[in-house]
Amino acid sequence: MASASTLAPGGIDVGAYAAAPVMPDVLPPVKPKKGFIGFLRRNPTIAVGGFLLLLMLFVAIFAPVLGTVDPTALAPAKRTREPSSMYWFGSDMLGRDVYSRVLYGARVSLLVGFSVAFLASIVGLTIGMIAGYIRLADSIIMRIMDGLMSIPPILLAIALMALTRGSVQNVIIAITIAEIPRVSRLVRGVVLSLREQPYVEAAVAAGTRTPMIILRHILPNTLAPITVQATYICAAAMITEAILSFIGAGTPPIIPSWGNIMAEGRALWQVKPYIVFFPAVFLSITVLAVNLLGDGLRDALDPRMAKRL
Amino acid sequence: MSQRLLEVSDLKKHFPLKGGFMGGTTGFVYAVDGISFHIERGETLSLVGESGCGKSTVGKAVLRLFPITGGQVVLDGQRIDDLSPSALRPLRRRVQVVFQDPFSSLNPRMRVKDILAEPIRNFGLARNAADLDARIAALMDKVRLPRDAVGRWPHEFSGGQRQRIGIARALAAEPDLIICDEAVSALDVSVKAQIVNLLQDLQQELGLAMLFISHDLAIVEHMTHRVAVMYLGKIVEVAPKRSLFGAPKHPYTEALLSAVPIPEPGAARERVILKGDVPSPINPPKGCRFHTRCPYAFDRCRTEEPKLVPVADALAPGHLSACHLHEMPAAENPLAGTKGHAVLAA
């Protein structure tokens, strides 16, 4: 450190600068917050998406105790009431409480979304693994998947629904079948690239058997892209369910779902827009929440994935 | 000890080119097209050549990561290329591998101890859990990594440290032969030197044989006992290090050596600049594969493929070369004698 009387070679009094505050050699490290709170802070999209989704889940589970009445109770005398303290979201043309119907409708949407995401991931993972590992199966399976993918998922789901009667279970099965090709293709691609990874080749050289290679080296590394894909499938499934119900090919009318509430409010939407508005808002928020969660997970699980998907 | 550890003869690996509507085979990539070499116990053989000449394919064929198209791989007197997967498994212990990229050669979802435990468990080398832990600790010591790092994930290590973990994994199986597939090429110079020295120490300590696949001639010269030079799926020259670096007997080797920079400012050497690019291994040239770029090529080179035979030179025992020039009178042979590139060997 230069003392106050030191003159630099140019004759400048270095001491004049000595009053400047001494900077510490090393800036104190910014401590990243640990644990769950820190994780949410670093991934705000996950926090927001997760919060909204939990809110919807809460609404769906506790629908009976959130000031609702029987969503199917008819009240012909009190048809098409505007939103009020009595009917928070108004009533429809049969006098049913839209608020109750929308809250109960969350059950169908979330059930369909989560079930389809789960089933399509499991089945797609299995098919993709087989295709990625067995050469002969690959060409056959993938041609079938290409064929399925050439039909828009919504059309495929409508066609499958036309074969059976409308029930939530059948809706789930139909949408799952329509979504499986996408997952299988993703998994197959990931498996094919993972098989060439040096750590897999090293494991082969180290005498690891094929089932163990798949279990220990391939499967754990496909879970990240699968999880991300599952959230997008969940969102797509909820929209498909709403579309199917809207055109009358999905959830039967006795079970309130956002799609069929909107379908029933369609005829009146110019004079009584709230019947369509509230389920639409709930659907949009839920799909947004799932997509935000998916984007957040994609970035958090593997930054490189952002480019691949 | 009379038997050679590894004897590869006429090894071929052709990759089919798929194309067309139903994925039919439209041709082959002749990645490795009939090469023979051997490795003695405790010996390092380096396999050098430019990108795409088939070096890594040789390594993977010896490891039997894929079935080979033709030829034989004999490990310690036993043929391994035609064994069934279950018959091969116990023999896999004897040949292990260290890969180039320290980032993709470790499973990101396994802890170091699990990575090291995998070969030990597979080959049943540990008697019990305590023995397993002791073996893992000993491996960490061997590659000069702290023992308490075994609980960490691969991403917590630097490139050089990851490469040490990769080496430890190879050693875990107690192999006789380690295939180093460009094992130091992805590291920076100082780390590279550490890893090279580590490999040499381990080789002396454990009596390992090594197949050292590399394109870095300076490192090869430092590491190796013998060198095999590959060009377009063929070995063109095999010789003890001193003999090869001192007096190459193949025009391709001569050109390769002349491209190695001299670590001395202002120093220059007479460069042999090759014309053109490496021909495609899908459609390799007839005759000698190097004739399209060889400065000494003559008519015979274009039609007849030279065999890899010992050079008739009393000063160069064990020096094999595949070049027609050596059948000419010494006076006319531009590669005769010991002139040339003694700089590296000095």
Image (cartoon, coloured by chain):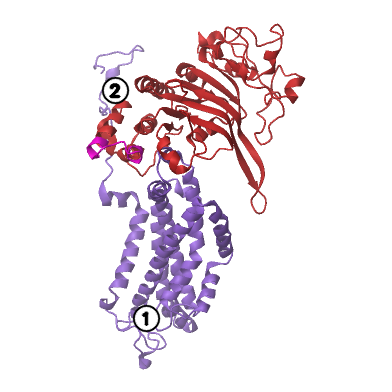
C-alpha separation, residue under disc 1 versus residue under disc 2: 73 Å
Q: Is residue A38 left or right of residue B105?
A: left
Please report the bounds of the magenta region as a residue range: B119-132
Q: Which label's residue is closer to the chain start, 1 or 2?
A: 2
Q: Is residue B304 magenta?
A: no
Figure quadrant of residue B323: top right
Check the residue under mark 1 and report the chain it is in: A
Q: Which residue is mark 1?
A: A98
| Amino acid type indicated by mark 2 | Tyr
The dot on residue B322 is none
Q: Is residue B126 magenta?
A: yes
Secondary-structure class at tag 1: helix
Residue that appears at 48% across and 63% down: A180
Where residue B297 appears, as percent x and y from the top left, is 72, 19
Furthest residue in direction left, as rendered: B130
Where is A39 relative to B120, above or below? below
Where residue A179 appears, as percent x and y from the top left, is 49, 64
Residue A199 in view in this figure: no
Number of residue marks: 2
Furthest residue in direction right, as rendered: B299
Few, some or many residues within 10 Å of mark 1 (<14, 14–19, 20+): many
Figure quadrant of residue B116: top left
Chain ID for purple: A
Q: Which residue is mark 2?
A: A17
| Amino acid type indicated by mark 1 | Val
Few, some or many residues within 10 Å of mark 2 (<14, 14–19, 20+): few
| Quarter of the figure with the N terminus of chain A | top left
Residue that appears at 34% across and 33% down: B172
Where is B340 relative to A162, above or below? above
Chain ID for red: B
Question: Who is closer to the viewer here, B165 or A16?
Answer: B165
